[in-house]
Amino acid sequence: MPARGDHEQRRREVARIAAELVATGGLTAATHRRIAAASGCSTTVVSHYFANKQDLIRAIYVEVGNRVTSRLVAAGASTTPLVAVLEALLPLDEDRVVDWRLLFAFLGVAVTDPDLEAEQRSRVAAVRARIEQVITAEKRMGSVPGDNDPERIASVLLAVVLGIGFQALFDPAYWTPARIHETLNQALDDLGPLERSKRPPRRR
Amino acid sequence: MPARGDHEQRRREVARIAAELVATGGLTAATHRRIAAASGCSTTVVSHYFANKQDLIRAIYVEVGNRVTSRLVAAGASTTPLVAVLEALLPLDEDRVVDWRLLFAFLGVAVTDPDLEAEQRSRVAAVRARIEQVITAEKRMGSVPGDNDPERIASVLLAVVLGIGFQALFDPAYWTPARIHETLNQALDDLGPLERSKRPPRRR
């Protein structure tokens, strides 16, 4: 009998494979049969890891959430943490586009499922708190104007970032990386005279 | 045999009933059997209106889109059209909350369906164009500062509104109407010195 750690690791591996199926074909594509075929195990084993569809959806969401958290941690170590944290949330490369796609597949179900809804609520609250922390730190360093309330700025900036991702996912031709940066810059400019060096490069 | 107009009207009625089922129980709740029971017709009749699930989802989305368009038209006639148009898009009453819920149920499917994705893309582009028009009109009236590019302002404001709705849907306790107004005000304030009378009231 495999150790508990092996079970967890194997379960996460299967969740990642299932996530790839969902990102391409939507939630209906992630049947136990297809997951089994793609991961090279039997449907019995897949059922052992995921009792039902909700169980599977939650596992995929946790995977996506963990990837987002890793990106935020990495961004926090940047010399321009506010911009880096906001960019970490935006669909600026294929990995982040896939995670946005998975997020929407998840939210389509979460919207009428109280457990999944609570999961989304706590994730977003954690991200907002993280942005607020970074703003507070940058205020101390003088790179965010001191007369702005960090919670309010965090609220507006997170709304801008989520609103961009929301649109970009369905209209990647309009929302090129250049336009995403430009819109984020506009929102940051609106906050007042930050130091230029704290901004992503302007591109048109 | 009923006239074509009757068929269309009856089909929309059934779509509205299906939308109520989706808003409460998600897309899985909108089975032909349940729609038939709720609308008082046979499953054969429901199948006649909606050949398959995608057909039904699209009809519900068109219903929601039409309601949003009606709200935007009404908002355009306001004495403060920019604020009114933005508020028309926000989940500030039960009808708009239901439409946000339906939108997310739809987007969960649209994310891997090119036809539905195109539908969403063109709807959002139309809303963005509408906001841009209103900004251009308000600039002429002097209620939006003249040094801002309408397309850029429209992009940021639409992102803010969508980002607020996105969060509010899963966290209505945090996103009270007061906080929604406050965040929208903050984003509008950021645009520069608009006339105070053009803003929604500040509440804390």
Image (tube, coloured by chain):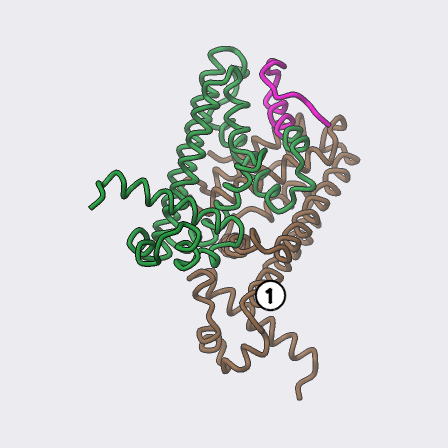
Chain colours: A green, B brown
Answer whether residue B3 is magenta in the image.
Answer: no
Judged from the image, the secondary structure of the residue bearing numbered disc 1 is helix
In depth, the one of A15 and A105 nearer the eye is A15
Residue A203, image x, y percentages: 70, 25
Magenta stretch in the rendered image: A184-204
Residue A160, image x, y percentages: 57, 34
The residue singled out by tag 1 in the image is B59
- Is A48 on the left or on the right of A187, as rendered? left
Q: Residue furthest right?
A: B140
Residue at the image point whose x is 34% and y is 54% from the top: A46
Q: Quadrant of the C terminus of chain A?
A: top right
- Is B127 on the left or on the right of A58, as rendered? right
- Compared with A3, B147 (above or below) is above
Subunit of label 1: B
Residue at the image point whose x is 48% and y is 39% from the top: B178
- Check disc 1 and give the amino acid type: Ala
Q: Residue furthest left?
A: A1
Q: Exactly how many numbered labels are in the figure?
A: 1
- Is A56 on the left or on the right of B96, as rendered? left
Answer whether residue A195 is magenta in the image.
Answer: yes
Residue B106, image x, y percentages: 54, 56
In depth, the one of A198 and B165 nearer the eye is A198
